[in-house]
Amino acid sequence: MGMDLIPLNPTSDAPRYPQDHQYAPNKIISGRYNWTGWDRLTQLLETWGINTEEFVAYNGGDIITEDKCKKVADAIDAHYDELTDKEKAWLKGHSDLWRTCGGYAQW
């Protein structure tokens, strides 16, 4: 259980699964967080001054706008060096997902 983030209008350079992926060959990679990770990400963003009003704690399809997603990507990149090694490993590459998703639906 957790939060699945479905890209709304992904850019052409949005990260994709490899062509030989067992379940989703060449499919755009969605954002996925377990509830602990979703809570931690929200805490980090709030600490970094990012308004998280669009972030919800249930799976109802609520939208995170493209503008907000780009701000999340910028914040992850700007504060990456401040993270613990565990958080760095967990969030590695996530800014690319946020930057190229074109907004997310939260499911």
Image (tube, rainbow, N blue to C red):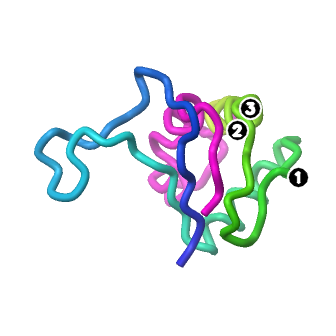
Q: Is residue 58 above or below residue 82?
A: below
Pick the residue in front: 75 or 100: 100
* Residue 39 in the image, given as x and y percentages of width and height: 71, 67
The residue indicated by pointer 1 is: 53
Q: Residue furthest top?
A: 12
**Label 1 neighbourhood size at 10 Å, few (<14), some (14-19), many (20+)?**
few
Residue name at image x 68 percent, y 36 percent: 69
Residue name at image x 74 percent, y 37 percent: 65
Pick the residue in front: 34 or 3: 3
The residue indicated by pointer 2 is: 72
**Upstream in the sequence, badge 3 or badge 1?**
1
Residue name at image x 46 percent, y 49 percent: 30
- Report the amino acid beneath label 1: Glu
Q: Give the SS element for disc 3.
A: helix
Assign the C terminus to one quadrant of the image. bottom right
- Report the amino acid beneath label 3: Lys
Pick the residue in front: 32 or 104: 104
For the record, the magenta segment spans 78-107
The residue indicated by pointer 3 is: 71
- Report the amino acid beneath label 2: Val
